[in-house]
Amino acid sequence: MSKIKVGVAGYGTIGQRLADGVARQEDMELVGVADMAPTLAVRALYEKGMPYDLYLVDGADKAAFDKLGIPTKGSMQDLIGKVDIMLDSAPGGIGAKNKELYQKAGVKAIFQGGEKNDVADVFFHGYANYEKGVGKDYLKLTSCNTTGLIRTVDCLDRSYGVEKVAITIIRRVADPGDYHRGLTNALQVDKAPSHQAVDLMTIMPHVDATGILVHTPVTHGHIITVLAKGKKKITKEMALEAFEKHPRIRVVRLADGFQGNASLFKYARDLGNTRGDMYEIGLWEESIVESGDDIMYAINIPQESVTIPETIDGIRAAMKMQEKGEEGTAKTNEYLGIGKFKAMGL
């Protein structure tokens, strides 16, 4: 069976990680990446020896790349003509314009959470609604927070049934290296319900969800607290048992030194993970508490990398590589090395 050929539009925070993730899939081929300018990410790609071919989007100044000696392979249209599916991680709103190029070429595409839902046939999550994406031409991923949130709610729902959730998101204000939000010393509250709660209900319409979001002046990871009501009472032991079985949930303990978002980021770096990325979300064992008939817990969202596995799940669904969610997510996990720590008893 020939490998599925994949291209990436936008070599920024997400695009770099998508390229790396696809390159690790033994049944896929990363044909190349496309970008607009010789950004720091593109310069780093060049300094690393150009492991991925680089194409230029419309409006790019080729002379700026030539001046730095950065080789390019052609236009984004050239890239689109060589692939089966594009992963679009362009800035929000640009993906909708790029879709016209994909449609003209008859190429499938997967868009990131910054695009509006109407850009795609299916609002997609690898675990919660994989089968709905099978064979579709255009999928859109949930945001980083929604992706991790749904992993846990879907995990409990599959095991015990969930009727309702209330969430509080403590949101990092910008990614590491970003300056566009300025220097702040404040917390900012968004109007409720947060879009993550609304998006969860779009993916899982049988669950009633609401939520509040608070912006915080930090960069490494979001933290979400979840209060869930099961169809029957979910005890701490029941929740912990379900969470510990999920490959993309890493149950951690305050007692072991995982004090917060910075601890998880440092641990990922100590593991030698590229850029300090972690595909799994962290869930604190000590945060799991029973509140009457409800269960409460807290999770950490590594915002730069958490959507990568679900995006690759999307390739598998759209290209009918695996038509069952368990098979598709398992293959993604295998090639990304997700869940290995569970086999080690960690």
Image (tube, helix red, strand yellow):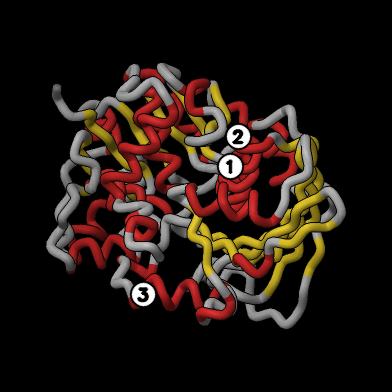
Along the line of sight, which residue is nearer the eye, 346 or 152?
346
125 left or right, relative to 105: right
Which residue is under mark 1?
A: 155
Query: Decide: marks 2, 1 in contact (CB < 8 A)?
Result: yes
- The residues tagged by marks 2 and 3 sit, at their Cα atoms, a distance apart of 32 Å
Ranked by sequence position, the earlier of labels 3 and 1 is: 1
Ranked by sequence position, the earlier of labels 2 and 3 is: 2
Query: What percent of the width, then of the height, locates residue 92?
Result: 55, 45
Along the line of sight, which residue is nearer the eye, 13 or 92?
13
Q: SS for tag 2?
A: helix
- The residues tagged by marks 3 and 1 sit, at their Cα atoms, a distance apart of 27 Å
Badge 3, how many Cα within 10 Å: few under 14, some, many 20+? some
Q: Is residue 202 in view from this perspective?
A: yes
Query: What percent of the width, then of the height, locates residue 221?
Result: 56, 67
Q: SS for tag 1?
A: helix
Query: What percent of the width, then of the height, locates residue 322?
Result: 34, 24
In the image, residue 160 sits, relative to residue 12, either above or below, namely above
172 left or right, relative to 37: right
Which residue is under mark 2?
A: 158
